Amino acid sequence: MNWKTFFALLARDAHVARRNAMQLFLQTFLQPLLFVFIFGRVMVGSGYMRPEYKSLLLPGIIAISMTFTGVWAVAMPLIAEFQWTREIEDRLLAPISVGWIAIEKVIAGMLQALVAGLVVIPLAWLVLRPGVEISIGTPLTFALIILLVAGFSACGGLALGSSMDQQHIGLMFSMVMTPMIFFGCAYYPWSALNKFPILQKVVLINPLVYASEGLRAALVPKASHLPVAAVIGALLFFDVLLLVVGLRQFGKKAVT
């Protein structure tokens, strides 16, 4: 393993991310912050929703921002590099194995997802205050969950970016990302689906459910949420599954 080459690739991706920071900010934060303002300020301020909803909403918004950022940061460059810029060919000539090139992409996406999650906390808090009550009761649990969420988003981006062609980008967001967000328990707790028992069980195949519920457990422990052990186990499963799928698809596409 050539670590110098690995970190050089990582540094290059970090430079590209810094150069496109404003575009990335608008793409990843604008929609979540609009949801925060409409549901957290307008709806609550008008009396249509209870004030406690602000605290319930914030962890879901963090989960959405991290998921969208990680997927976008890995999938979109991969689609471009494989389809029209052909930049991936230069990376494949580097003195490093194909698998580690994919892992470097995942780590770069994880770092961007972590930044998105940590930045959206104060931004959303400023929009929602006063009345939002969040606390990190167990820092280690919060750190583990946020790392696993970043991992699932970046590994998901690797799997999607290595599997889809450029003409299917719109399909990826309309058929994959949109249902994932609306059925990901980001705007409501999983327990809110008690009256829809079949749907409540079906949504458990959505990794965003565990991201939202895990962050809810870490930041608003008094709110209804799935057991932390179940959340951590499910996120680990999805991280490994998506990484394995992504590495396989990346390897196939790299040799064609």
Image (cartoon, grey):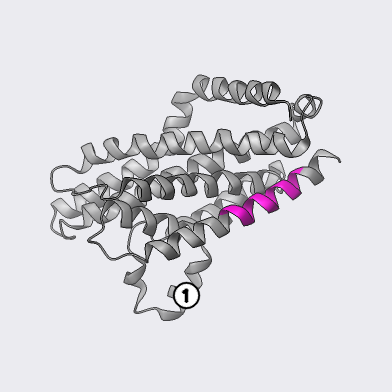
Q: Residue furthest right?
A: 256
Report the side of 76 relative to 122 (left or right).
Answer: right
Identify which residue is drawn at 23% across, 50% down.
40
Identify which residue is drawn at 14% across, 51% down.
45
Report the side of 74 relative to 235 (left or right).
Answer: right
Q: Quadrant of residue 190?
A: bottom left
Compared with 108, 199 (above or below) is below
Numbered disc total: 1
- Is residue 246 covered in magenta? yes
Picture coordinates of residue 15, whole percent (x, y): 55, 19
Helix, strand or loop at label 1? It is helix
User: According to the image, label 1 marks what residue?
Assistant: 201
Picture coordinates of residue 234, whole percent (x, y): 50, 62
**Can see residue 146?**
yes
Magenta stretch, residue numbers: 239-250
Q: Is 101 or 167 nearer to us in this picture?
A: 101
Picture coordinates of residue 141, whole percent (x, y): 37, 51
Compared with 56, 61 (above or below) is above
**Can see residue 179?**
no
**Where, quadrant-wise, is the C terminus in this rendering?**
top right
Q: Quadrant of residue 97?
A: top right
Instruction: Give amino acid for label 1.
Output: Lys
**Where, quadrant-wise, is the N terminus in this rendering?**
top right
Report the side of 124 relative to 86 (left or right).
Answer: left
Q: Is 38 or 143 nearer to us in this picture?
A: 143
Identify which residue is drawn at 59% across, 49% down.
156
- Is residue 138 covered in magenta? no
Picture coordinates of residue 77, whole percent (x, y): 64, 33
Q: Magenta-highlighted stretch: main secondary structure? A: helix
Identify which residue is drawn at 32% across, 45% down.
139
